[in-house]
Amino acid sequence: MATSSRSSAQPAADRRLAAISQHLAGSSATNTLKGRNKQESSENNKMDSFKQQPHKLLVIPGPIEVADDVLFAAAHPSVSHMSPEFAGVFQDCIAKLKQVLFTETAQPIIVAGSGTLGWDMAASNLVEPGEDVLVLNTGYFGDSFAECLSIYGAKVEQLGAPVGDKPTAAQIEEALKKRKYKMLTFTHVDTSTGVLSDAKEICEIVKRVSPDTITVLDGVCSVGSEQILMDAWGVDVVLAASQKGLGVPPGLCVTCVSQKALSVFKARKAPATSYFASWAKWLPVMEAYSKGSAAYFATPAVQLIYALQASLTTMTTRSPSLEERFALHQETSTKLKKAVQDMGLSLVTKSSDAAANGMTAIYTPDGITPGDVVGKMLKKGVVVAAGLHKDIKTKYMRIGHMGVSVVDKSRGDIDQIIQALTESLVESGYKPKNA
Ligand SMILES: Cc1ncc(COP(=O)(O)O)c(C=O)c1O
């Protein structure tokens, strides 16, 4: 069985319980500065000693493995969401998320929920019924975003591509010249196909051909594993979730909205057509937290915000740097894709420039079902995913390589995936080309 805790004299579950109970006991420490410093240093010691219990290696394309310090942060003692302490943590998350997205001017909106809520936010706050939206569709998640937009009354046009590919620059330009769209959406990495869209190129085309159109990047499967230069490229909305490249357990919808998108929102003719997703409700709350004060619309996922802070702190202040992190994802992706191709298997993505760096979609050999391989890998302690795209669902599987599995090479996760895949294929009767 794969483990993420590599040493164990005391049984892992006991150590985990002991660390969490010490963590919780620590909350009653005195509030003097001296006491706080002492508490912080003992918290750090406990954090360093916390190791999660042995478990199967989770390398589906999200949720992903979570680092020990992030999981430990999610066991933070209860704190009021209106307290100065929590407001400071939220403020830090907002500032650090802006660093991850390379934006100085956009407004993060972080709420309890999942990535899907980001679609509802974009659809209900930025589009009014009957307005035109262009969806660049590279797989299952393009279909779903289009469906969500239609539910809110948008007139949706989709520009697709053959499975494993993306619309060309010329096709996007032509579509934008034909009709004026209020909004263009694209899935940065479509998790069903592993196709990576060229965010910089798409935004450049929009700025040149249709500068009023708002660009929405679905970054649920790309934030943290692909570089996104929000300000430099002119991305108006990035929507994401906690459980993939951000390396946090599921439960947070993480979005970031440019000033241009905010002015489009503020110029709406009618109020937004949602309640929980309403930016009119959330913006004052996020603006308050941005300044370090608390405000309330609906209760935040307090402990997940602590976990997000831990993960964003690692990403923005520790080694590897953000740039090195993205380079590591590229390097790992190249290594895994090469290993797969050397075995004689084909990737779903048609070219390397359309291939994500945080996941890989692989056709299984003729006569061997994805279920066979996924099931055998599971028995070896490695959890990968079967197919999702309706046209090829029975022919392929998906592997995620994001976050701590990539950045902490000492874990050996990538080699473990390659070994389990090779052995599982052999057990299924396949002879790897390079055997
Ligand atoms: C690209 C993409 N968009 C949106 C979603 C929906 O996110 P969630 O499942 O967190 O609601 C997913 C989920 O995997 C995704 O991969």
Image (tube, grey):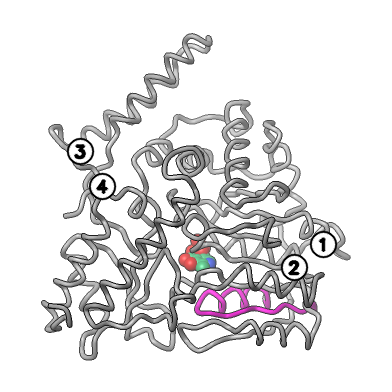
Say which element carries label 1.
helix
Q: Answer with left or right where residue 354 lies relative to residue 263.
A: left
- What distance separates the C-alpha of mark 3 from that of mark 4? 19 Å
Q: Amino acid at mark 4?
A: Ser
Residue 391 colored magenta? Answer: no
Within 10 angstroms of label 1, few (less than 14), some, or many (20 or more) residues? some
Say which element carries label 3.
helix
Within 10 angstroms of label 4, few (less than 14), some, or many (20 or more) residues? few
The tag earlier along the polypeptide, 3 or 1, is: 3
Say which element carries label 4.
helix
Q: Amino acid at mark 1?
A: Val
Q: Amino acid at mark 3?
A: Ala
Residue of label 2: 214
Some atom of ligand 1 lies within 8 Å of the CB belonging to the residue at label 2: no
Q: Answer with left or right where residue 146 lies relative to residue 26.
A: right
Label 3 or label 1, whichever lies nearer to me, is 1
Determine whether label 2 and label 1 are within 8 Å by CB. yes
Within 10 angstroms of label 2, few (less than 14), some, or many (20 or more) residues? many
Label 1 or label 4, whichever lies nearer to me, is 4
The tag earlier along the polypeptide, 1 or 4, is: 1
The tag earlier along the polypeptide, 3 or 2, is: 3
Determine whether label 1 and label 4 are within 8 Å by CB. no
Q: Which mark is residue 264?
A: 1
- What distance separates the C-alpha of mark 3 from that of mark 1? 52 Å
The tag earlier along the polypeptide, 4 or 2, is: 2
- What distance separates the C-alpha of mark 4 from that of mark 2? 42 Å
245 or 99, which is in the foreground?
99
Some atom of ligand 1 lies within 8 Å of the CB belonging to the residue at label 1: no
Q: Which mark is residue 12?
A: 3
Q: What is the quadrant of residue 130 in the picture?
A: bottom right
